[in-house]
């Protein structure tokens, strides 16, 4: 697991795809889990694999509030994740960091239910499923929601990766580095007016606008999603009177953030699951578990593909 996932979860995200799908637990995905939550026995033990910041454990806990059921939900993740606050409720949630889902630190047949949402597929999926079945009790349920290779999330994030990896972005940052030095130390509006009247500065501004225009033509929505324009806006508004060294430091930060975004989304795209992947998964389950359900989850608003739902019943 790359360090950029540690950073990502520290930012408080609940899903591995950030803001690409709004209303992710109050809408269609909430419904996917509701039946399983209702079926939990009292004094249950649930394991959530690749839990991130515990979206599924927290969803289960919220759904069970006001009921008489009690139990424990453990979430594990290879990244460093945030531990939720203990509110002394009847449903105890504990998140464990630095746990490889292909080598779970639990005895066989420990949990009545094992879950994962947009997480287990980042590991070798077949191996992770076999390990999940190992710690699942007989007659237990393994329910997975995994990224569909042709989902709306994948399509949107492919566009972002295509944009941030385009050479135009490199040209933008090279030009911004030049402009940061060219501006020098600006201490007043007089200095600012001087720069605006400078011929070379004006030529660079025109070139910057041209490059941005090319990126807009390439994919305006992906440009917005990448936050590149936010970084540029911050430099020329908040950062206009920063020292040259601080401007260059900020540009280095912005470049690193976009590189991290590209790496994270590339991993997300590579983790997405095809129909052939699912066929292999079902075959690998073999005699240990029976396929109970497989379906394509679609968004309620646009009727667009979002994910696969896969449910196994352990013999």
Image (tube, helix red, strand yellow):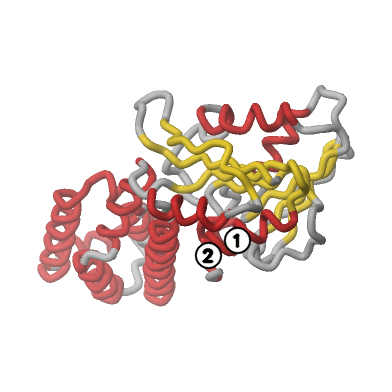
Instruction: Residue at 81% x, 52% y: name it.
Output: 110
Residue 41 is left or right of residue 221, and the answer is right
Tell me the quarter of the picture where residue 290 sits.
top right
Residue 299, position as x, y percentages in the image: 42, 30
Quarter of the image where the N terminus is located = bottom right
**Camera sees residue 152:** yes
Element type where label 1 sits in the image: helix
Instruction: Residue at 46% x, 41% y: name it.
Output: 308
Element type where label 2 sits in the image: loop
Name above or below for residue 21 compared with residue 8.
Answer: above
Q: Which mark is residue 191?
A: none
Tell me the quarter of the picture where residue 254 sits.
bottom left
Instruction: Residue at 68% x, 41% y: name it.
Output: 141
**Camera sees residue 237:** no
**Cα gap from disc 2 to disc 1, whole angstroms:** 6 Å
Q: Which residue is mark 1?
A: 128
Residue 249 is left or right of residue 67, and the answer is left
Closer to us: 35 or 175? 35
Closer to us: 64 or 297? 297
Closer to us: 23 or 109? 109
Q: Which residue is mark 2?
A: 124
Q: Are marks 2 and 1 in contact (CB under 8 Å)?
A: yes
Residue 207, position as x, y percentages in the image: 13, 63
Name above or below for residue 148 compared with residue 271.
Answer: above
């Amino acid at each position: 697991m790359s360090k950029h996932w540690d950073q990502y979860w520290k930012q408080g995200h609940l899903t591995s795809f950030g803001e690409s799908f709004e209303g992710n637990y109050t809408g269609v995905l909430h419904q996917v889990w509701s039946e399983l939550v209702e079926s939990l026995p009292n004094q249950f033990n649930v394991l959530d694999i690749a839990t991130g910041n515990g979206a599924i454990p927290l969803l289960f806990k919220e759904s069970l509030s006001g009921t008489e059921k009690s139990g424990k939900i453990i979430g594990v993740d290879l990244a460093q994740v945030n531990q939720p606050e203990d509110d002394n409720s009847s449903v105890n949630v504990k998140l464990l960091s630095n746990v490889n889902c292909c080598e779970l630190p639990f005895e066989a047949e420990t949990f009545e239910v094992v879950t994962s949402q947009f997480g287990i597929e980042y590991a070798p999926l077949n191996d992770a499923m076999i390990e999940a079945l190992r710690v699942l009790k007989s007659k237990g349920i393994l329910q997975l929601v995994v990224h569909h290779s042709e989902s709306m999330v994948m399509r949107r994030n492919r566009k972002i990766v295509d944009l941030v990896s385009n050479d135009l972005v490199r040209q933008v940052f090279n030009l911004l580095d030049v402009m940061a030095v060219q501006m020098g130390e600006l201490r007043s509006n007089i200095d600012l007016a001087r720069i605006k009247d400078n011929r070379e500065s004006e030529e660079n501004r025109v070139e910057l606008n041209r490059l941005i225009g090319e990126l807009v033509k390439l994919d305006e929505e992906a440009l917005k999603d990448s936050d590149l324009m936010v970084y540029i806006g911050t430099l020329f508004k908040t950062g206009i009177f920063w020292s040259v060294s601080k401007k260059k430091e900020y540009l280095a930060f912005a470049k690193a953030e976009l590189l991290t975004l590209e790496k994270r989304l590339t991993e997300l795209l590579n983790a997405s699951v095809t129909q052939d992947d699912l066929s292999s998964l079902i075959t690998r389950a073999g005699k240990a578990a029976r396929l109970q359900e497989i379906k394509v989850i679609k968004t309620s608003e646009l009727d667009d593909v979002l994910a696969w739902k896969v449910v196994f019943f352990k013999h």
